[in-house]
Image (cartoon, grey):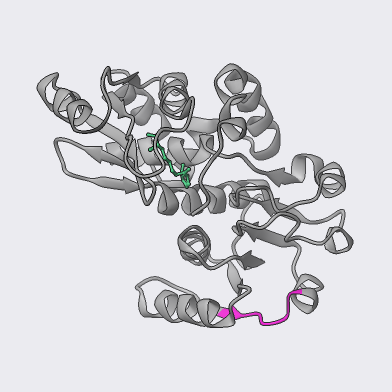
Amino acid sequence: MTRLKESDISHISSNLPAYDRELSAKTGKTLLGIACHACRADEMKIREQAGTFSIQVVPVTAGQGIIGDFSQTVAAILHFMGFKARVSDRPDISGIAAAFEQGADAVMTADDHRFVGINLQTRTVSDNSRATGRVFAGGLDLMARGIKDKEVLVMGCGPVGEAAAKTLLSLGARVGLYDLDPSAAHASRQRLSDGAGRGTSMVEENLDRALLGYSHILEATPAEESLPLESISDQMLVAAPGVPLGVPAKGCEILGDRLLHDTLELGVAAMAVSLLL
Ligand code: 2YC
């Protein structure tokens, strides 16, 4: 899991209205709308419930410690979506205890290993990796005006890529799995075929050859420039939850509105919606 740097997220809070407009242009839906689409939730109902749902964001000093602006940015994203959100006055256990004592409906908190939302009533745990994979798959579905029966190459078979593949299969896409470590791709394929649900995925062992055959890409690697410039065509649609962005700058220019990427917003939005389900 890539650890975010303050510079990855410091722009987010002040840019949320503009980002919402960018998402609408790319997918036809807003941040809340994409998260609801990915979670198969009714947007009107979620918007209504969010207004009275309080989420306490609790900083955690353990391990590598606090990332500047992280908790404040998470709270700003939640507030922008209409949730009652605030950062706890104290970090760690004191913050968790205060959330319960103050009757918060949920907490959102991250150590070096997991970033989760926890619904304090239902005990539902929404995991950032799963939510991020799911919401970027949902965003690709929207950009493609329906991903059903289309072929999608998932690059990176970690928790985010595998969650994206699972969602894409449930949407009726045909999924190719690529990873630098072929055994990781094979293990993902096995888990995906064991699980309920539909469709089968296949492992792509050679990236250059695979990229010749796919025009829908879900880039979920922690590598920069994982998508070679020469492979980027003017029909390609790319949903890229991977941090740092795996598309070279020139590639971003070519893709324009056909590239979906952020470092926190969509994943947090999907985590929050799934806490209400
Ligand atoms: O500020 C804090 O409370 C820190 N304990 C937060 C640490 C987050 C570590 N995880 C990451 O940087 C990201 C997650 C947002 C998702 C994947 N990596």
Ligand 1 is found in the corner quadrant, namely top left
Q: Would residue 29 be visible to someone looking at this image?
A: no
Horizontal side, residue 32 vs residue 14: left or right: left
Q: Quadrant of the C terminus?
A: top left
Horizontal side, residue 273 vs residue 188: left or right: left
260 up-or-down from 229: above or below: above
From this viewpoint, which residue is outermost toward the left? 101
Q: Nearer the viewer, residue 108 or 149?
A: 108
Horizontal side, residue 226 vs residue 67: left or right: right
Give yes or no for residue 11 being in the magenta stretch: no
Q: Which residues are magenta?
A: 202-207
Image coordinates of residue 80 in percent, x first then y, are 47, 20
Image coordinates of residue 177 in percent, x first then y, are 59, 73
Horizontal side, residue 173 vs residue 90: left or right: right
Image coordinates of residue 142 in percent, x first then y, are 61, 46
| Residue under the point 63% across and 74% down | 180
Residue 208 image-quadrant placement: bottom right
| Residue under the point 64% across and 51% down | 240
Residue 213 image-quadrant placement: bottom right
77 up-or-down from 228: above or below: above
199 up-or-down from 163: above or below: below
Give yes or no for residue 204 being in the magenta stretch: yes
Q: Would residue 130 be visible to someone looking at this image?
A: yes
Image coordinates of residue 66 in percent, x first then y, are 41, 33
Counting every numbered tag in the picture gives 0
Q: Nearer the viewer, residue 190 or 183?
A: 183
104 up-or-down from 129: above or below: above
| Residue under the point 29% across and 26% down | 55
